[in-house]
Image (cartoon, rainbow, N blue to C red):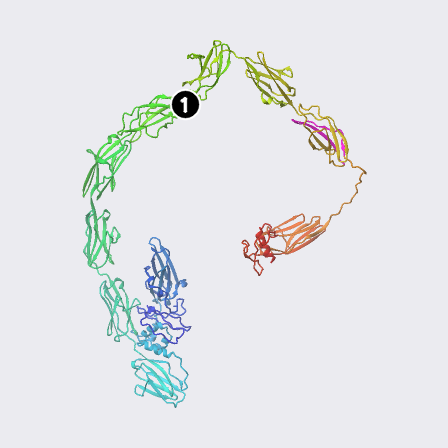
Amino acid sequence: MPEPTKKDETENESAPPPPEKTTPQEGGNEKGKDEDDTSVSTPPADGVSKPAERKDSVWSLGEGAPEESEKRDDTQRSTLFIEKPQSGTVSVGGNITFIAKVEAKDLLRKPNVKWFKGKWMDLASKAGKHLQLKESFERHTKIHTFEMQIIKAKENYAGNYRCEVSYKDKFDSCSFDLEVTESSQAAPSIDIRSAFKRREIKQQEEEPEVDVWELLKNANPSEYEKIAFQYGITDLRGMLKRLKRMRREVKKSAAFAKGLDPAYQVDKGGKVRFMVELADPTVELKWYKNGQEIRPSAKYIFEHKGNQRILFINNCTMTDDARYYVTAGDEKCSTELFVRDPPILVTKGLEDTSTYVGERVELSCEVSEDDANVKWFRNGVELSNDPKSRYRIKVEGKKHTLIIEEAAKNDTATYSVMTTGGQSEAKLSVDLRPLKISLALEDQTVRLGQEIHLKCEISENVEGKWYKNGQLIEASDRVKLYHKGRIHRFIIPVSAVDDEGEYMFVPDAYNINIPCKVHIVDPPKLHLDGLGENNTVTVVAGNKLRLEIPISGEPPPKVFWSRGDKMVTDSGRIRAETYPDSSCLVIDAAERDDSGPFRITLKNEAGEDTALINIKVVDVPDPPQAPNVTEVGEDWCIMTWEPPANDGGSPILGYFIERKKKQSSRWMRLNFELCKETTFEPKKMIEGVAYEVRVFAVNAIGMSKPSMPSKSFVPLAVTSPPTLLAVDTVTDTTVTMKWRPPDQIGAAGLDGYVVEYCFEGTDEWIVANPELTDKTKFTISGLPTGSKILVRVKAVNAAGESEPKYYPQPILVKEVIEPPKIRLPRHLKQTYTRRVGETVNLVIPFQGKPRAKVSWEKNGSPIDKNEINIRNTENDTIIFIRKAERGHSGEYDMKVEVENLVDKATIDIQIVDRPGPPEVVTIEDVWGENVNLSWKPPKDDGNAAITGYTIQKADKKSMEWFTVIEHYHRTSATINELVIGNEYYFRIFAENMCGLSEDATMTKESALIAKDGKVYKYPVYDDFDFSERPLFTQPLVNTFAVAGYNATLNCSVRGNPKPKITWMKNKVLIMNDPRYRMFSNQGVCTLEIRKPSPYDGGTYSCRAVNELGEAEVECKLEVRVIYHGVINPGEPLSLAGDNQVYNAPTPLDIPFHSHPLFPHANAFSACKVCISLLF
């Protein structure tokens, strides 16, 4: 559909020649002037005139320029649209939606879509009340949908639109037209083109003539061809050359007061008038046409009116279309005359036509002139006579014909023809020809693996689609689809079971289908590849057998199971289960009687198949007999058993042995590898514990039940031999032996000992004790004096007698005297000291035989056994005092006698206690600040040496005692550094190894420390008046603070009574504000401002008030903001209010120092702030 045109804003000095061929869509548009120019548009195909487009429309077209899409490389173009927006028509005030769809299967992200009107107007910026752009995405189909909806359309919305889609290097675009028609209630529109034409087929009122020259001079060069076609200009190129000359600047002429117009136009057969006005009427005037002088005639008429010279040209023809000029002396004035052909009228219009698909269609019309320029349109879009186009235009004189060789369904449209003086349109309807089925598809039964061949024939040569069970079938290596003329074939060379179904052929564009059914058959077959030799299946007795036999066949065959003459049903312990592709024989809890052959038979309409399957039921062996324990050791035994009577149908592979304690119910496996023999030796049993053992038999099927347990048995072992066998005593007729128990007794315990002896030179051992003795000492009696015997001892328990322990040498039966010997312990060789109340228990061993006699004396007198307990044995004596007293101290004499032999020892026992206090303490002398004391040692030293004295003093006024000297050894001492004027008492404690005495001896008199010389009289002083009005000793100083860091203001004040301190900001009292904290310590007053901001700046004052008056100091605080961080060394730093930026020093440039604004800042941060504040 042609786009509207407008005048160019500026006229070019020279107009470029028009392109050889320009379609209405290719013509660009320029912005019009500010005047209300009228645009001219080609009427749409439906014959309704389209109103001129307003200049102030928000959808006015942009300046004509090459489209960006035309500059793209053709190699980058690709088809992205799967559905393009189609041209449409809408009434004024109606709504219309254009839809574009893009498939996202190969796109990683959403494509970029733009909508344009004309060439350059991007409609994304115009979205609003009348225009909405939408987009959506369907995840299942992976399709992006883009919609442009026009709401309440206006007349100026009509025109050409374009949709562009791009993704990376891919690009696609589509143009479409929008036609806006007036509603039935609106007044009929007027075709503006009628103002520039004489008449159309339907005559309208006369309109003023349009100057084609003015249109060409003001039009865009891209509009030249359209204007030439509308106004019947045949020699457009020559006209443009003359127009170029007309645009040259005309110099002022001295001969002509008024010259010719640049150009004149006249219709063919009409009359034209040229007029010039001379400055001098006497000058000779001549007229020329294309350089040839014009002579007066009936065609050319000259007229003189005063200074005006007029030329009339009557009955203009196309030969009069030329360049004319007039000369006056040496000057001339030129013009151009354009002779316009009359408009071409449509004398015979197009007629509505209906046809069938594939037929030849001819749409014809007749015009008023031979070989006239006629344009054809389809739905408002111009059709070209391109050889590649499916439309062919034929011209025969005044008859013009549009030919479509093979009409298609989409050729249904409104076709129109347009001339310079009229137009005509007609509707073409292309329908499908009624379809007849010449040969329908037939139902087929095909054996599996054979060819499926479906064939049908229809009356029309159209394409079609094949369906199976409603699903579209595409051609592939397996499926062959053929179409030749009106015959369609469907072939599958090798059929499969899945190929069975309902097939259907549907011709394209017809609502008809040709169905058929394909039935696949296959003889039944048993697949026994997974079974063993001779189709034997082995199952363990008690287990469930589920034998699944794969089967095949189409249709699915019927399955029959039998055992002998009896059929196997689908219920019971032995049953058959049938599935589409298999059959199962199920035996619940298989028994040995279930062994034997089973027959399976398959039958269907294609045949039958049968096979025998052998079922073998095996079981675990019977349990062996109870084992026998033939031998028992310390932690082992030997057991034997017999093989089981029944091996369960499978050879015995071995045995497992278990044992348990008799009192326990937990059995423990002894071997993890099968024992191949019927004898086993369990080990690592606990001695003395009763055990039982049992056996399991194992074959390939599994393990039997356990055998009965064996009789209980207890692993036992004899003890080791007794140890340290020695001779205790020997008399003339007896020998006493002693020994120690065995090192290893065992779990069986120790029942006793057997003592045996034999005389030297014989091998006969005589049992000395007929009954076992449980003691480790035994006396062999009844021995002849002077004889020699050998002795051995055996330990006996439930397991028997141990190995004997021999005494290494013969023993002479004769008594031997051992002299007494006291073995006094080392700590008793010195004085044995104990405190009063402690226990004394002394053991003194001795030796001597036979029958040693022990006696005790204390300080030469016998010991009182009521106070001291004495207990004697053969080897030692014990002296025991339960609670020692000081009277128990002394020398104790011990004497051991054996016949005439004696041994003695003395033990010194000392019982000590704390000493008594010293005797009289005397103040010997007092001088200056010193006092000399003397005393006597205590009468009772506690039975221990006095180790020192402790001296204490007490002021007479307070009588609080303070230690002056400790651990002092002498009996006189000088006490120094006493306070003059005080009066003191002194006391002394005695000390020994047990500690200080319980009491102390105090001086009876006191010692007064007086000053030598005159007595000083203390002067009397009046009380000093310390009252003082407040006075600031350190005033406040002006301070800079950094925003965000705590700041403090400090000053010091004195006054008595203590003044009350108040703080003020800008003369306003600071009270109950959490941002401020006030401190006062020892007269130093501090105000802390927490994280101040620039608003905290101002004048701060501190006021001190007491009864005598008041004082006040003030300072100014300025809070600055750091615009650059102070973290990185050397970073530029600036504060609010500064005009310069300084580089803060690093920590190496300035040493660390504190800053009142940053008491807790580190060295670097404090230095940077200080430097900034200094500036």
Q: How many marks?
A: 1
Q: Nearer the viewer, residue 596 or 579?
A: 596
Residue 1092 shows up from this direction: no
Which image quadrant is residue 313 in?
A: bottom left
The quadrant the N terminus occupies is bottom left
Where is mark 1, residue-wise? 687
Asked if 587 appears above or below 133 in the picture, the reply is above
Asked if 380 appears above or below 111 in the picture, the reply is below
Q: Amino acid at mark 1?
A: Glu
The reply, left or right, for residue 708 in relation to residue 1173 is: left
Name the spot of residue 820 as percent of width and height, x first: 57, 15
The reply, left or right, for residue 896 in relation to residue 548 is: right
Asked if 667 appears above or below 903 in the picture, the reply is below
The reply, left or right, for residue 1022 in relation to residue 215 is: right
Name the spot of residue 1047 as percent of width and height, x first: 60, 52
The quadrant the C terminus occupies is bottom right
Name the spot of residue 971 as percent of width and height, x first: 72, 28
Magenta stretch: residue 998 in it? yes
Q: Nearer the viewer, residue 206 or 431?
A: 431
Magenta stretch: residue 196 in it? no
Q: Nearer the viewer, residue 270 or 105?
A: 105
Residue 106 shows up from this direction: yes
Q: Nearer the viewer, residue 145 or 1114?
A: 1114
Magenta-tinted stretch:
981-1008
Q: Seen from this angle, which residue lies furthest bottom?
A: 282
